[in-house]
Image (cartoon, helix red, strand yellow):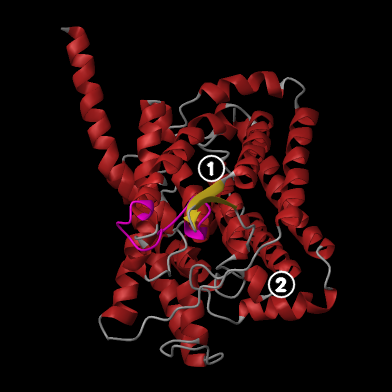
Amino acid sequence: MKEQKADNSTYILRMLFGFSAALIIGALCAGDFGNLIPGFVTICTRPAQFTMDYFVLGGLGSAFLNAGLVGLICCGLLYFSKAKCTGLTVAAFWLNVGFATFGMNPVNMWPFFIGVWIYSRIKKVTFGSVANLAMFSTALAPFASELMFRYPAAETTGFSWLGLLGAVILGIVVGLVMPALCAHAPNFHKGYDLYNAGPAAGFLAFLIFCILYKSPGVPQPENTKLGDGYQLFVSVFFLVVFLLCLAAAYMMDKSCFKNYKALWKSDGYKTDYTEAFGMPVTLVNVGFYGLFILLYYNLVHGMTMVDGSLVFTGAKFTGATMGAIMCMMAFSAQGAQPRTVFPIMIGYAIASFLPFLMYVGGVVPEQSWTLTTQGILVGLCFASGLAPVAGKFGFFAGVLAGAVHAILVTTVPQLHGGFCLYNGGFTAGIVAFLVVPVLECFRRAKKEEAKE
């Protein structure tokens, strides 16, 4: 068993390195070489408030380069700290790389790595044992960019040494408290939010936002910017990557597709697929789940009324959409798969009728959101963290959880000002807090009635 775990760790690190390399190759294939480095520099030296589309800010190739370099930094962190890679490591990596197309970069992530390293020195543990927490702590990376390049002004003012000091101090504080908060978070959502760091980061971001902005009366800045996206390029990139995952799984174990049935039946609750089913089967899930997500984002359409006619709009493949696909893959090795995520998608679709009917019925002057509103596209990504709800309680419970998440997710950013990248994971924790006790109560009552 120890040999299998060691092999899994090596395979996981290779997979993460391979994906980082694929992003670098994607950057080279995107063209516009003259803007590749200047665009990357722009990404690293601007505020990164949720959601800033790096396709717009730096360009397509530069956004891919940024994501690839963030991935390589994470791989280097894992390799040199001698961390044991598990399904949780896959989650931490995908989240960092995912947000590297709309909120994270090599500059604003380092203060948090330093903070967790100091935590490891104080607690006298190896940095490798907390490497995952170091990657999760970057959920508050936008605060670091804000301090270095804009705070307290409303417009970007440029690099500030005082701001750098503030970002480092912030990173140290976050690095010292995030491990404790993450350890406590399951008590809040009972293990039903796969994005366990979401509630921890969300509540901490709420506190920091109040300290930096609300309490002293500093005006909250706004810099959300979204483009039209690159649907063909992004879709082809992911199609190739996910098919390569399936091919790699087959090369590792020719019976992996047959063995995938066991993972398919799993409820995903507190389950590390790499340990429970092995790396080949996990790679099959990465491939199938990735293709499933890609299909959804290509097929989903938002519904609204324009001049008395029903109009359907497709999803724009912006940097935020691409990042959402990668973030959605975060728990492909630990709890998420097509069977348990599909009910959550249905819940989102059902919830979308609420703003539509309110608008059509003349109750409100405009429709607040559709299924292809950017915040909802990103929100679904983190709603997938509620997959164990569907796995444990069934299809309709998953639908309920998805619908509640859709209703809450665009409102929760008001708590942290858009500075918490894990907004959807924070929302998922709140949904689990609201929904799971009720589901457990009625399931328990149902079982007691059956005994009688």
Which residue position holds label 1? 331
Against 389, residue 355 (above or below) is below
What's the magenta bit mostly, secondary-structure-wise? loop
Describe the element under mark 1 as helix, strand or loop. Answer: helix
Is the residue marked by circle 1 packed among few (<14), some (14-19), or many (20+) residues within 10 Å? Answer: many
The answer, for residue 121, to whether it is visible in the render is yes
Check if residue 360 falls in the magenta segment.
Answer: yes
The one nearer the camera, 421 or 57, is 57
Q: Position of residue 372 (x, y in %)?
A: 53, 53
Answer above or below: position of 29 versus 156: above
- The reply, left or right, for residue 65 in relation to residue 275 is right
Decide if residue 271 is in sight here. no
Residue 373 numbered mark, or none? none
Per the rendered image, the range of residues in magenta is 359-375
User: Do the residues bearing badges 2 and 1 touch, measured as CB atoms within 8 Å?
Assistant: no
Q: Estimate the x, y position of residue 447 in percent, counting from the top left.
A: 23, 15
Check the image and report above or below for 358 versus 46. Answer: above
Residue at 63 percent of width and 70 percent of height: 54
Q: For marks 2 and 1, give the one nearer the viewer.
A: 2
- Indicate the quadrant where residue 387 lies: top left
User: Looking at the picture, which amino acid does disc 1 mark?
Assistant: Phe
* Residue of label 2: 59
Q: Position of residue 186 (x, y in %)?
A: 33, 44
Q: Residue at x 18, y 13 (%)?
A: 449
Mark 2 secondary-structure assignment? loop
